[in-house]
């Protein structure tokens, strides 16, 4: 049945009829599930079987009446995993046994396409994970005792490369803009304003990352998706991400030091009547905020393996990067606060009328 369905799929893989493709895809799923059920064998304690083929990966786990495990381990494939309370399910069966078959199909997304999902017409549909299947073969009572947890990894995992790199490029852009403003302490000239227009910055922020990812994928097409990370460590492919990140972090660190020096000098000359304690508080906050916004806190990530304290500090600072951006560009920005006041006034007036 499996080979027959596979031949039909290959013959009609170019078919434009989504219903026909879905029918063939479902045939393969059903046939595969039946074949997987033949791997289930009686056991007193527990047993497992796993295999990896070009088109499909599978795992079968079985438990018996004398199982000694508190819970079964997570069933893993390259791009997906499942957690299921198979021991609890077995206790509801007269045989006190149960089995789970978990499969991940590496190319099924070409047949069971995302076009089957009903979304708005202006939505770009992309299958971001492999198609998976989980059944409870040769199990009389298949009632679930606890929710089943599926974990799906992105298979496009290049998209993550682009988003991360573009994020770092924007951090560099922000550092350059902030350095220019602090250095001049005045309005940016019209000539510089044209060069630093939002459209030009968007081109830099996204095009640089896109070019880096395109070159990386061209050189190592299979560089994404390892067991422990979204990017593979072999063939030096990791440096297609770490290389640009290290350069950007180094530049941002230099700019950060210069920005802090200039801000400190400006605060000293701004108002001699401001108390030293208040000035120090302002300086400390601005320094911390700039450190996080410019992405310099990512440097701690290179040392997290050697210290648990640095790992916790790294997680706290980088998880709050969005918070610091909101504080600096919204809460502490006078123009933005005025716009918020206008908005609240309009809302209040609308409610009164």
Image: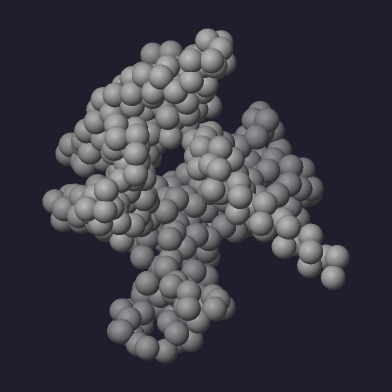
Quadrant in which residue 270 is drawn: top left
Looking at the picture, does residue 280 appear above or below residue 159? above
Residue 302 seen anywhere in this rendered image of the structure? no
Residue 183 seen anywhere in this rendered image of the structure? yes
Q: Residue furthest top?
A: 276
- Residue 104 lies, in percent from the top left, at 45, 57
- Residue 180 lies, in percent from the top left, at 29, 37
Q: How is the image coloured?
A: one colour
Looking at the picture, does residue 158 appear above or below residue 299? below
Q: Quadrant of the C terminus?
A: bottom right
Q: Nearer the viewer, residue 253 or 9?
A: 253
Residue at 59% across, 40% down: 331
Residue at 48% across, 15% down: 272
Horizontal side of 240 relative to 83 (left or right) equals: left
Q: How many marks?
A: 0
- Residue 107 lies, in percent from the top left, at 36, 65
- Residue 325 lies, in percent from the top left, at 50, 39
Q: Quadrant of the N terminus?
A: bottom left
Looking at the picture, does residue 352 appear above or below residue 255? below
Residue at 31% across, 61% down: 199
Q: Nearer the viewer, residue 192 or 198?
A: 192
Q: Residue furthest right?
A: 352
Residue at 16% across, 53% down: 215
């Amino acid at each position: 049945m499996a080979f027959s369905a596979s031949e039909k799929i290959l013959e009609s893989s170019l078919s434009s009829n989504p219903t026909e493709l879905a029918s063939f895809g479902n045939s393969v799923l059903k046939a595969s599930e039946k074949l997987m059920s033949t791997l289930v064998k009686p056991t007193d304690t527990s047993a497992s079987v796993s295999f990896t083929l070009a088109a499909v990966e599978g795992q079968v786990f079985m438990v018996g009446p004398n199982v000694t495990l508190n819970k079964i381990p997570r069933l893993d494939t390259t791009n997906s995993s499942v957690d299921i309370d198979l021991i609890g399910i077995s206790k509801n069966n007269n045989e006190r046994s149960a089995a789970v078959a978990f499969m991940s199909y590496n190319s099924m997304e070409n047949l069971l396409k995302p076009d089957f999902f009903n979304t708005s017409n202006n939505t770009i549909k992309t299958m971001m994970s492999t198609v998976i299947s989980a059944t409870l073969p040769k199990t009389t009572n298949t009632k679930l005792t606890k929710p089943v947890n599926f974990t799906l990894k992105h298979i496009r995992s290049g998209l993550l490369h682009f988003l991360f790199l573009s994020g770092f490029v924007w951090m560099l852009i922000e550092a350059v803009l902030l350095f220019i403003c602090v250095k001049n302490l005045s309005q940016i000239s019209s000539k510089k304003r044209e060069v630093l227009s939002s459209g030009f910055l968007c081109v830099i922020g996204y095009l640089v990352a896109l070019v880096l990812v395109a070159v990386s994928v061209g050189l190592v097409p299979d560089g994404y998706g390892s067991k422990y990370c979204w990017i593979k460590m072999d063939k030096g492919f990791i440096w297609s991400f770490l290389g640009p990140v290290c350069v950007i972090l180094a530049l941002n660190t230099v700019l950060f030091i210069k920005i802090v020096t200039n801000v400190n000098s400006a605060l000293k000359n701004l108002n001699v009547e401001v108390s030293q304690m208040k000035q120090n508080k302002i300086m400390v906050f601005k320094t911390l905020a700039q450190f996080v916004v410019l992405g310099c806190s990512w440097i701690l990530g290179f040392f997290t393996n050697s210290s648990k304290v640095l790992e916790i500090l790294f997680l706290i600072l980088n998880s709050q990067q969005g918070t610091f951006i909101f504080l600096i560009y919204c809460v502490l920005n006078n123009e933005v606060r005025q716009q918020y006041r206008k908005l609240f006034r309009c809302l209040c007036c609308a409610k009164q009328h």
